[in-house]
Amino acid sequence: MKKKLVSVMLCAVMVGSMLSTVTVHAEGDKGEISMFIASPEYADAINTLIDEYKNVEPDVTINYETTQNDYPTLLKAKLNSGECPDIFSSTSGKEIETYKEYSLDLTGQPLVDAMDPNVANAMKDADGNGCYGLAIKGNYFGLIYNQDLLDQAGVEKVPETMTELKDCVEKLKAADITPFTSGYAEWWVYKHIFQHFVDASTDNPQKLVSDLETGADSLSNYPLIADNFFEFIDLVKENGDQKPLEADLSAEEAAFASGKAAIIVGQGAWVEADLLKINPDLKITFSGYPVDEDASHCQVITGSDQAIRVNKDSENKDIVLNFLNWWYTSDYGKSWFTDVAGVVPPIQGDFETDYEIVKQGAKSVEEKGAAPLEIIYSTDSFHQAFGEAMQAYVEGSVSKEDTIKTIEQKYQEIDGASN
């Protein structure tokens, strides 16, 4: 989820992107794989994976390119010019259908049998068929607390209701501790927060999203969204970063890990490694979002929001599939998720991890269940417009009522046309 670009070697590929090329050299397959995916926060781990693969197939060259904020634009430019990479990525869920015409159905591949069923469900098409992607990671989404600061403020219980959250905020302030750091400069932070309130509003969030896209329903019919969500956004703004719209992910991580704020919002399992680099002694507590007065609604969200796709017309299809199947089924590939990338494994099995968010997230799901990964029911084109609407609200230039109207309009204009 980071905006920064990470690479090993620079190549003139496209403006705004960076290319890291790892040339892999033993017996077996020969050829080149072009790999263009988002999530540069995993670039180091993926480069390690590719480097390990050279011990398996040294005569395969993997050209790995990664970027973040401009990824959808760059990918579409490649597709429009007929230069679809052998491996590319998108969000899972709704965007599986968006890029289905370019994507190989992986059904029958060993990697699909290895895949966690929750991840596999996010890779199906609109009719619930096929498997059009795989994932670098599963994920856990929720609130992350600095436990030492909670202890310092006398907060004895991690909040599960809005009342408990407000009480926590007051105790932190009384101890001269800033309660929140928001990351409100990032458009995607808002979608991560929003999904918790959507999930608690309905037993069928996918239908709600679909009805919003057609105009058959309204956010105003759901108080947890129309009221509580905005109340939460305001609570964070009023008790967080001095300039919330200038607080990006890096600033958010730095504030939290250094003890300048007690609660980091809009994030999940992917930030822990960076937090521990800043402060190896950081004591983390992870929980769902308090969204109302019903503690059972305070659930973490789990699933996979990103999909890695295989170009169905790739001339290198066999060597691509060999690489990806090795990744998901070999001993090294399976251990890579926890031991190298430090992520929630998207494959089946029992895994040990030192990451607290992963451990606590799994325990929370076991005890309280998990809420659906609502964000995959919409495209990132919608979510970016949604985030920009929320940034205008945080700025104070647009009312809550007008913001709701804008969000409903974007549901219909951006994602509704495909229904």
Image (tube, rainbow, N blue to C red):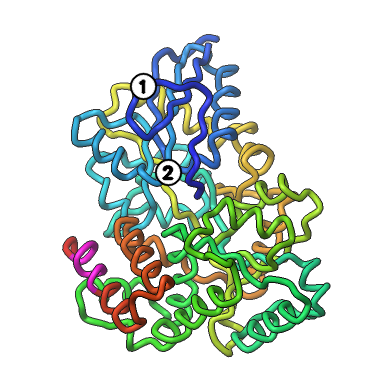
Decide if residue 357 is in sight here: yes
The spot of residue 22 in percent (x, y) is 50, 20
Decide if residue 363 is in sight here: no
Is residue 289 positioned above or below 50 on the image? below
Q: Distance between the residues labelled 1 and 2?
A: 17 Å
Could you say whether the residue bearing mark 1 is in a helix, strand or loop? loop
Is residue 69 positioned above or below 211 on the image? above
Is residue 120 positioned above or below 325 on the image? below
Read off the magenta span.
409-416
The spot of residue 275 in percent (x, y) is 68, 51
Q: What residue does disc 1 label?
A: 12
The majority secondary structure of the magenta stretch comes to: helix
24 vs 126, left or right, is right
Tell me the amino acid under the disc marked 2: Gln
- The part of the image, by quadrant, that contains residue 146 is bottom right
Q: Residue at x 54, y 42 (%)?
A: 41
Circle 1 residues within 10 Å: few <14, some 14–19, many ≥20? few
Could you say whether the residue bearing mark 2 is in a helix, strand or loop? loop
Q: Quadrant of the C terminus?
A: bottom left
What label sits on residue 3 in the rendered view?
none
Is residue 317 positioned above or below 95 on the image? above
The spot of residue 260 in percent (x, y) is 71, 62
- The part of the image, by quadrant, that contains residue 239 is bottom right
The spot of residue 403 in percent (x, y) is 32, 76
Q: What residue does disc 2 label?
A: 68
91 vs 39, left or right, is left
| Magenta span contains residue 249 | no
Tell me the amino acid under the disc marked 1: Ala
Closer to us: 94 or 63: 63
366 vs 33, left or right, is right
Question: Nearer the N terminus, badge 1 or badge 2?
Answer: 1
